[in-house]
Amino acid sequence: MTVSTMAVAYRYGGSVSIAQALLPGPMSSEKTLPDLQVSYPAQGEYPSGEVEIYGAQPEGRAMRPVIVDIHGGGWNQDAHMPATLRWFADHGYLVLRPSYELATPQHPTADSVPGQVLGAYRWCVEHAAQWGGDPQRVVLFGDSAGGGLALSAAYRAAEDSSPFRPQAVVALYPTVDVNAVARVRTLGAGNAAREYVGADEDKNPEAFERASSSRWIHRGAPRTLIIQGEHDTFVPPDSVEDFVKEARTSGVDVKLVRVPAADHAFDSQGAGSLGFQLVTTVTESFLLSSI
């Protein structure tokens, strides 16, 4: 589905004009720092990390649906989007944002970070009630490299009737095909992908295949929303469309929103921008029908 610059027909069960969806309404609070930061322990062979918490409530109050956010940053940086996370906290969600180990030229992380993210996600679900979250209503959310990791973790967590099954996953311009990103020569994308995997795509294609989200697609995967800019110069849009086709063929309920003329991270201008409003509005509509 394409989001037109003239209208947004995306509210499930109806439509809404761009004036209704994107003109300024009640804004998120000016506070963008997390309410709390806690540590999560090592998960087996995977290292410990930190969890930023937005929208924390005292335990025992009405439990909020939970968003576990997996951050982007090309696998080698921690790219923050605090205005977006605060917006969801202000609109009734508990948001948990775990860290994960970042890649360096001397230390590729493609073989360890997906497992670390999955373990961190499970820890967040187990402990969400401490901060007013409902462990039965959980969605994974991620952008860019975090979008690919969120999809992989969500699909893995939904295998074998796991008690940690998320109700949905939302991925913004996700790196679902690391090999496709490795071939991009703009924005440092190719270097970031090779650094993450620790190999050249032509010399070790199997390593890139292991790092890609499509290996985890299965019929029982949760409802999925993907938002992708049609002019993305970091994540090739056709790699995302190929992922969506494969997932749909496997029986996964996937909604793809294509944003015309939008590049990578088109929503990063901050609260109030059209990209920010599009992402929050479309995502909230999807979540209201999913959890």
Image (cartoon, rainbow, N blue to C red):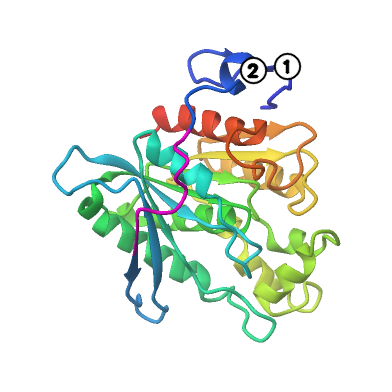
Report the amino acid beneath label 2.
Answer: Ile
Classed neighbour count for the residue bearing mark 1: other residues with Cα under 10 Å, few (<14), some (14–19), many (≥20): few
Q: In terms of sequence position, does the residue under pointer 2 or pointer 1 come before the other?
A: 1
Circle 2 residues within 10 Å: few <14, some 14–19, many ≥20:
some
Residue 153 in the figure: left or right of residue 59: right
Badge number at residue 6: 1
Q: Which mark is residue 226?
A: none
Residue 150 image position (x, y, % from top left): 50, 54
User: Residue pushed farthest front?
Assistant: 30
Range of the magenta residues? Answer: 28-37
| Place of residue 228 in the rendered image (x, y in percent of width and height, measured from the top left) | 68, 40
Label pair 2/1, CB-CB below 8 angstroms = yes
Where's the N terminus, which quadrant? Answer: top right
The residue nearer to you, when weighing 145 against 27, is: 27
Callout count = 2
Q: Which residue is mark 2?
A: 18
* Quarter of the rendering containing residue 41: bottom left
> In the rendered structure, does residue 277 fall within the stretch colored magenta?
no
In the rendered image, residue 283, in percent from the top left (x then y), is placed at 51, 34
